Image (tube, coloured by chain):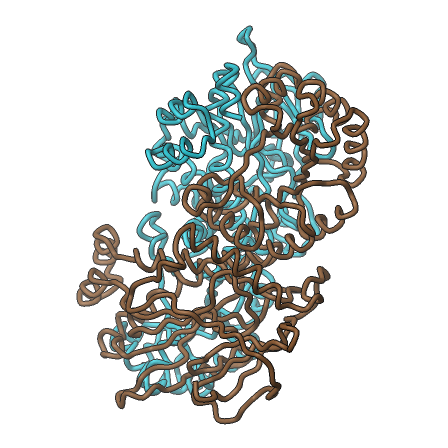
Chain colours: A brown, B cyan
Amino acid sequence: MLDAALADDTASRACLFEVFARTLPHGRRYGVVAGTGRVLDLIRDFRFGEPELDWLRENEVVRPATLDWLADYRFSGTIRGYREGELYFPGSPILTVEASFAEGVILETLVLSVLNYDSSVAGAAARMVSAAAGRPLAEMGSRRTGERSAVAAARAAYIAGFAATSNLEAGRSWGVPTMGTAAHAFTLLHDSEEEAFRSQIEAMGPGTTLLIDTYDVERATDLAVEVAGPALGAVRLDSGDLPALVASVRARLDALGNHNTKITVTNDLDEYTIAALAATPVDSYGVGTSVVTGSGSVAAGMVYKLVAHRGDDGEWMSVAKRSAKKSTIGGRKNAVRRLDDRGTATAEVLYVEGLEEAGGSAAAGAERPLLVDLVVDGVPLDEHLGAAGVKRAREHHVEALRELPLSAFRLSRGGEAIIPTEYAAERGR
Amino acid sequence: MLDAALADDTASRACLFEVFARTLPHGRRYGVVAGTGRVLDLIRDFRFGEPELDWLRENEVVRPATLDWLADYRFSGTIRGYREGELYFPGSPILTVEASFAEGVILETLVLSVLNYDSSVAGAAARMVSAAAGRPLAEMGSRRTGERSAVAAARAAYIAGFAATSNLEAGRSWGVPTMGTAAHAFTLLHDSEEEAFRSQIEAMGPGTTLLIDTYDVERATDLAVEVAGPALGAVRLDSGDLPALVASVRARLDALGNHNTKITVTNDLDEYTIAALAATPVDSYGVGTSVVTGSGSVAAGMVYKLVAHRGDDGEWMSVAKRSAKKSTIGGRKNAVRRLDDRGTATAEVLYVEGLEEAGGSAAAGAERPLLVDLVVDGVPLDEHLGAAGVKRAREHHVEALRELPLSAFRLSRGGEAIIPTEYAAERGR
């Protein structure tokens, strides 16, 4: 595409690309935007170096003129979109990229890879956080996703309300609080469970979390209390019939006087098993596979579409694909969330530039603007970057969730977006 | 774990860790090992640099002595396992790491992240290849997985029999054949579909593939032939009711005399929709989401377990976790695939060092050894690395598939491993 567009001079046409999802992942009532800060970092650093150019040249993938263009590539356009941590609904213009066709089209795969994966994780994580009803969740799924995606998953889960991660690199690069745990291998390495427990307490102090299900949970509970004393921080269960097991471990800890020793569970949890443990005396959860794989929806289904370009006359023209089932609403959009008088969201309203017929209802209500500047003339805005950006996204997510009606937090699958998306004619915006 | 083990001197104990999957992904009859070559690369380069050490120090994650150990980290152990491209079954010791506890335990997350993701993709890809029954498949799912996982997915799909990828970086770093495609944006950018087609043919020649479903498929088919002539390489359909659409486009192309123009389809395909197109005149498939997300099983479920360590007396001791439902068979294993006299696999036989009672049947048959050296004394063997390693893995995969009974290629879900895994007492191995 790039090669042909550079050759026929359409490459320089000013274009507006839009990232949106046609639907939410199956059974979800709202989506959570995540990955925006990572996208901005990656776009800022997106270059074609000598190894890449050499390979493209040797394999004659593009013409020499295109190689020259790639060698100089540096994004100089403007990106607006939803804040990271914001909620989204079908059609929400999560990210809009305004640039020449060439500059914009080349970012499609990068932008979608990041937003699809990170938002998928964040959407799943948000459901787990609401299922946990205030008990802290730790992300422990690095080993269940690609080695780089693992860092992104820890970051996205944190934005959606997880308390910590076992991924230290996510702590280093994004400021996510980290935690550790001992695995069964640590117990098996030692000549006895007692030696393993003593070694861990020697190194970490009695406030550590001891893994008690390597051999026999009941004996290990007694041993943990015997070795660590009343200050034992927590015990961890990673297998077995959790509700029954948790209750018996709690009773045993209490009988031994360890009322302050907490119980953490980590056995293939997802939002449903977390909810099923609501009535048990669990204190915290460690979640692996289900959160890093988006709990069954590992790609958020976002697409990156050309919605408008500027013609030779300088006027912007809406463009849209019209094929079956996948049609796109062309045109530049302004997005607001309509709120009723109690501040509860009632609709995602998209004001479409150039839309003739006003679709949707004309219901009244306050409107919270959703689009903010992310990159201006090629420069990403600092507030969205780094650990500070992650912290802001996490805070913003909490604010945005407060606007949702209670029914948004139902766990059952088979629902649909909790508020409708309305396309409306622009009103002087 | 590392901190405590270095403090109590168990860190230096010689250990044997084993990577295996307790079960195959739901409905799969065989698994496909992928990621091995990437793991070897990553282990060779696995270091803790100043930024990482500084962060660990500032956050007091580990003691100073552990920081010193990390600063010098360099894997010096030995790794044996299944060849990349090999098939695996529940319990197959896909990778075994023999090293000190400290050197081995620190690789767990890295090794599992790579093998779980890559093998998940390869397992799904292999089913699509068999469903396609000889028609070529292209991997086009980069945008539906993390930005680094995208390269790994293209590589894994190729090992499992895909013909090409749209991910150029996978071409550059792993030698996977690459292909491109024009998106709807390219058509929308131009003032008319005709201008877009002319531009593409100007740049790429008439042998290119034109996307014909931006507006109206029938008109675009006529236009494509008119613009490109009889040498038009292919047309692509990305939406709509594919079986009916494919048949009508084929009829139209034939009526226009373009008997050699191929049809490629790319609309949210997976192994089932590919199979459903078997009777239609499709020539090739482009597969996105489903292959890069492991078609519903995005993590292969492999675990990394300590199965033996050498005691103070110098003797190896088998160790195993015994908790409910997740027990592990301890001990060093030799793995062979038992074949009947026609060369068809009948069992995965694991000879376990120190196993007292001989489990499984004592059926006769040829035995193909499955374990090969991958890393010797810290040095990865060249034959498994780089583009040449990928090519070997792809070839080996074809060889290994030939041993499977025909029923292994049933598409229906709900099956189980096509051959049993038998644990047997070692026989002088």
- At which x and y percent is residue A298? 55, 56
- At which x and y percent is residue B188? 38, 81
The correct choice, above or below, for B229 with respect to A80 in the image is: below
Q: Please, which residue is most extreme toward the top here?
A: B313
Q: Quick one: quadrant of the N terminus of chain A?
A: bottom left
Could you tell me how many numbered marks the image carries?
0
- At which x and y percent is residue A360? 59, 86
Residue visible at 54% across and 42% down? Answer: A165
Residue visible at 41% across and 84% down? Answer: A319
- At which x and y percent is residue B285? 48, 65
Q: Which quarter of the picture shows residue A239?
A: top right
Q: Quick one: quadrant of the C terminus of chain A?
A: bottom left
The correct choice, above or below, for B116 with respect to B278 in the image is: above
Judge from the rendering whether residue A151 lies leftward or rightward of residue B353; answer left or right. left
Depth check, front residue: B398 or B79 = B79
The correct choice, above or below, for A316 with respect to A179 in the image is: below
Q: Please, which residue is most extreme toward the front here?
A: A341
Judge from the rendering whether residue B65 lies leftward or rightward of residue A258; answer left or right. left
Regarding residue B236, the answer to whether it shows in the image is yes
Regarding residue B260, the answer to whether it shows in the image is no
Residue visible at 28% across and 69% down? Answer: A377
Depth check, front residue: A352 or A20 = A352
Q: Which quarter of the picture shows residue A242?
A: top right
Residue visible at 57% across and 79% down? Answer: A366
Depth check, front residue: A384 or B359 = A384
Q: Please, which residue is most extreme toward the bottom here?
A: A356
